[in-house]
Image (spheres, grey):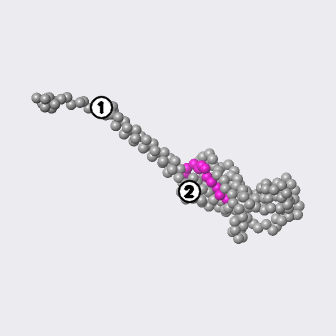
Amino acid sequence: MSENNEMFKDIPARVPFYKNTKFWATILLAAVGIALVLLFYKTVIQDTMSDKEVAESIQVVWHDSIWVDKKVRPDEATIVPSFTFKIKNTGKRPLQYVGFNCIFIFEESGENLTDGYVEAVKTPLPPGEVSEEIFVKGFYGYRATSKPAFIKNMPSWKPVKVKVYAKSKNSGQVLLGTYPIQKKIEGIKVVYEGQEEMN
């Protein structure tokens, strides 16, 4: 008799799915998974630029060069090459946090004189827009007793040029171009051969 009673015991009512903790745990895990996938896409895939895209997205549209002071010792003058330029975003996406590596080399031999690096374009540069001026200077250069002494030795200076490379967060270095460095010294204006004047 007791066995029969056991057989006819009430079957417990099923809990609705929306009250089931397993259901909500599954939903929560799925939502976290989707959020992580979207975050990965945004920060890694979407922001990644190939070397080819970097090359097609950055164009040097203006440049200037001058030799500038590098304060090392009070009893001598040291000047280093510098390169100032603007870029245009010729790509389809905004540019941001682009590193520029400038290799200053002797024109005839191709031997390295010095290099300089700067990270620029801190705020997004939309397609078709031109950046602010970007300034890069080398670490090493020429030494003399004074700035005017450089002018006297200028005819013996070997011509220098700069190779400008760009790099985005995830790309390799891409050569943007090679440009001559002018024989101009900051703070000195040559009036005529053999005579100089301080600005």
Residue 118 in view, yes or no? yes
Residue 97 is one of the magenta-drawn residues? yes
Q: Height in image: 128 above or below 107?
A: above
Q: Residues within 10 Å of mark 1 (few under 14, many from 20)?
A: few
Q: Residue 152: give x, y in percent of width and height.
A: 85, 64
- Classify residue 73 by image quadrant: bottom right
Which picture quadrant has residue 145?
A: bottom right
Q: Quadrant of the N terminus?
A: top left
The residue under the point 42% across, 44% down is 33
Residue hosting label 2: 171
Of the residues tagged 2 and 1, which is closer to the observer? 1
Q: Residue furthest left?
A: 1
Asked whether 142 or 128 is in front, the reply is: 142
Q: Is residue 41 left or right of residue 161?
A: left
Residue found farthest to the front: 2
- Percent of width and height locating residue 181: 73, 61
Q: Earlier in the sequence, mark 2 or mark 1?
A: 1
Q: Is residue 158 magenta?
A: no
State the residue in front, 133 or 128. 133
- Relative depth, front residue between 1 and 121: 1
* Picture quadrant where residue 19 is located: top left
Q: Which residue is mark 1?
A: 16
Q: Which residues are magenta?
A: 90-102
Give, as a three-letter code, the residue at label 2: Ser
Does residue 63 show up? Answer: no
Please state the horizontal and vertical placement of residue 23, each as a whole percent of the image.
Answer: 34, 37
In the displayed structure image, the side of residue 97 where residue 188 appears, left or right:
right
